[in-house]
Amino acid sequence: MSTVTVRLRATPAQQDILMDPARCKIAVCGRAWGKSTLIALGLTKASQEFPGCYAAYFTYKADFAHHVMRIMRKSAAFMSLVRRAYCQFPPRFEMVNGSTINFYTTAGLNRGPRLKFAAVDEAAFIPEDVFSNVTVSSGDSARIASTSRRTASLARSNGFCPLPAGW
């Protein structure tokens, strides 16, 4: 099995979050912290650790989904792992190892395949029923939720606690 280094740089705090063994993770951070890069790294990591799996990015705006996809496309090493990239909505990457990374908006969200990794961006702006569908559909998989506002109320209402990452 060959190894490819994906050149998306992670800060020490981002590495702490990615490598933490906790199943549910919430990144409590402000603007320009690197939440999109963190999500791109998490999606890439999951798609390579579990060949044939489904990973998904959920957000409430299509622009956010395209932004994360653009971050991933900038890495030549990442694109070497991609068999085919679809830019039509919903965009997705089909990986060489059979994994798929899907990008969804919550407007058209329905329960899809069992996910190994679900990234929920700006989770505080996503209605509660949609957020619970994301967590239910991901089953026993690893998950990460990323938000920059109203995280305290999100954590209370969904029973998640932010992880200390020494920021």
Image (tube, rainbow, N blue to C red):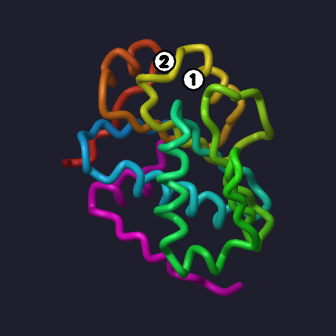
Q: Main secondary structure of the magenta part?
A: loop
Q: What label sits on residue 64 in the rendered view? A: none
Question: Do residues under tags 2 and 1 come within 8 Å of each other at their CB atoms?
Answer: yes
Amino acid at pointer 1: Phe
Place of residue 11 in the rendered image (x, y in percent of width and height, measured from the top left): 28, 63
- The residues bearing labels 2 and 1 have C-alpha atoms spaced at a distance of 9 Å
Amino acid at pointer 2: Asn
Q: Residue furthest left?
A: 167
What residue is rendered at 61% in x and 28% in y?
Answer: 106
Res 111 → quadrant: top right
Place of residue 139 in the rendered image (x, y in percent of width and height, measured from the top left): 70, 34
Q: If the image is split into quadrants, where does the N terminus sit? A: bottom right
Q: Is residue 38 left or right of residue 116?
A: left
> For residue 143: magenta?
no
Place of residue 60 in the rendered image (x, y in percent of width and height, measured from the top left): 52, 30
Q: Are there few (<14), some (14-19), or many (20+) residues within 10 Å of tag 2?
A: few
Place of residue 66 in the rendered image (x, y in percent of width and height, measured from the top left): 54, 51
What residue is rendered at 39% in x and 14% in y?
Answer: 156
> For residue 7: magenta?
yes
What residue is rendered at 66% in x and 23% in y?
Answer: 133
Q: What label sits on residue 131 in the rendered view? A: 1
- Mark 2 vs mark 1: in front: 1
Relative depth, front residue between 123 and 139: 123
Lower position in the chain sequence, tag 2 or tag 1: 1
Disc 2 designates what residue?
158
Q: Are there few (<14), some (14-19), or many (20+) residues within 10 Å of tag 1?
A: some
Which span of residues is magenta-colored?
1-22
